[in-house]
Amino acid sequence: MKIGVPKEIKTHEYRVGLTPAAVRELVSRGHFVVVQQGAATAIGFADGAYRAAGAAIAPDSSIVRLARVPSYQPVGCRDGQSNTKLPSPYAIGAPR
C-alpha cells in the first residue's frame, strides 16, 4: 500500500499522521510511505528522521492522512487516491 503523510494546514495544528517509528513499522511490513517535506518539523521530527525510517520525502502523496478532521471542502484526491483521518468526537452525528 502507498501511504502519504501531509503537513497539516490548519492554523496552530502541529500533529502529524505518523511518527518516524510508525513509518518504520509500516515500511518493515512492505508498505511504501511518502511524507510531505516539513510535515513534522514543528514537533521536532526532521525530514531526515522519516527518511531514516524508510519514507520518501515529497511535496505530494497518494493517500492523505490528517491528524484533524478535514474541512468540509474537498481534499482534492485524484483518481485512485483515498483520504483517511482520525475520528473526532466533534464530527457530525457524534454523541455530545
Image (tube, helix red, strand yellow):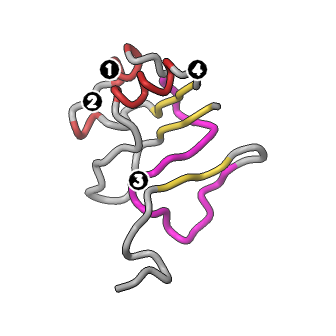
Q: Nearer the viewer, mark 4 or mark 2?
A: 4
Earlier sequence position, callout 3 versus callout 1: 3
Task: Give the residue type that dot 4 points to.
Answer: Gly
Q: Which residue is mark 1?
A: 49
* Image location of residue 63, percent across then percent down: 60, 42
Q: Quadrant of residue 53?
A: top left
Q: Are marks 2 and 1 in contact (CB under 8 Å)?
A: yes
What element does badge 1 sit on? helix
Residue 8 to residue 44: above or below = below
The image's mark for residue 89 is none
Q: Which residue is mark 3?
A: 9
Q: Nearer the viewer, residue 1 or 55?
A: 1
Q: Quadrant of residue 7?
A: top left
Quadrant, the N terminus = top right
* Image location of residue 24, percent across then percent down: 41, 22
* Image location of residue 21, percent across then percent down: 34, 27
For the residues labelled 3 and 1, the Cα–Cα distance comes to 21 Å
Q: Is residue 69 magenta?
A: yes
